[in-house]
Every structure is written in C-alpha cells, then in structure tokens.
Image (tube, helix red, strand yellow):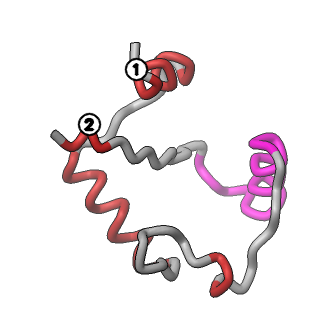
C-alpha cells in the first residue's frame, strides 16, 4: 500500500479524491486567493493574516471560532507525481 493509499484509508469513508476537473477548479480558486512562489507554494510572507499552528486541532478550533458558518469540507492537497500518470 502506498502512502497516498494509507492516507485515504486513514481518512475513512467520507474521504473523496477529486477528479482532475475538480482539482483544476480548486487550484484556480486557490491561485486567485493566495500569492504563490515560482516553485508552487503559497508565499506566506505576502499573506497579511497568517497564524502559526502546531496541530490540526488548533486549526479546527480557530476555524470554528472565526468562521462559525463554515461547512465541514476540508481539502488536503497532495502532490504525488505517480498520480499524474
């Protein structure tokens, strides 16, 4: 089992792998909202409101406090070259 497959398994039955079309739409939206470096990472130095968090629990607590109407969809961006073949 690959690391990708292990992660999908660990996330459980509510996990959904996006199609290429859905992935492209998500990346387009992300690119419109955040500045990116030439090597494809979010350029956090250019993001005005940013916070350092050490765990997913901290992120969830922050989101629930700051954006209570937020839905429960969370995107995990995974880059594995073998998935593109």
Please indicate whether residue 49 sits to the left or right of residue 78 in the image. Answer: right
Q: Quadrant of residue 49?
A: bottom right
Q: Nearer the viewer, residue 82 or 19?
A: 82
Residue at (57% x, 78% y) in the render: 43
Mark 2 neighbour density, 10 Å: few (under 14) some (14–19) many (20 or more) = few
Q: Nearer the viewer, residue 75 or 78?
A: 78
Query: Residue 51, how many percent across, how many down?
Result: 80, 68
Q: Quadrant of residue 39?
A: bottom left
Residue at (46% x, 24% y) in the render: 3
Q: Earlier in the sequence, mark 2 or mark 1?
A: 1
Residues marked 2 and 1 touching at CB (< 8 Å): yes
Residue 59, numbered label = none
Q: Which residue is mark 2?
A: 82
Residue 2, numbered label = 1
Please indicate whether residue 42 sits to the left or right of residue 47 in the image. Answer: left
Residue at (83% x, 57% y) in the render: 65
Tag 2 secondary structure? helix
Q: Nearer the viewer, residue 4 or 34?
A: 4
In which quadrant is the N terminus drawn?
top left
Query: Residue 4, how many percent across, how many down?
Result: 43, 28
Mark 1 neighbour density, 10 Å: few (under 14) some (14–19) many (20 or more) = few
Please indicate whether residue 15 sits to the left or right of residue 47 in the image. Answer: left
């Amino acid at each position: 089992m690959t690391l990708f497959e292990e992660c999908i398994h660990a996330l459980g039955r509510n996990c959904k792998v996006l199609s290429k079309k859905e992935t492209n739409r998500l990346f387009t939206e992300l690119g419109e909202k955040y500045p990116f470096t030439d090597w494809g990472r979010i350029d956090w130095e250019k993001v005005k409101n940013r916070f350092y968090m050490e765990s997913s629990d901290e992120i969830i607590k922050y989101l629930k406090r700051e954006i209570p109407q937020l839905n429960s969809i969370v995107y995990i961006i995974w880059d594995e070259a073998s998935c593109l073949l």
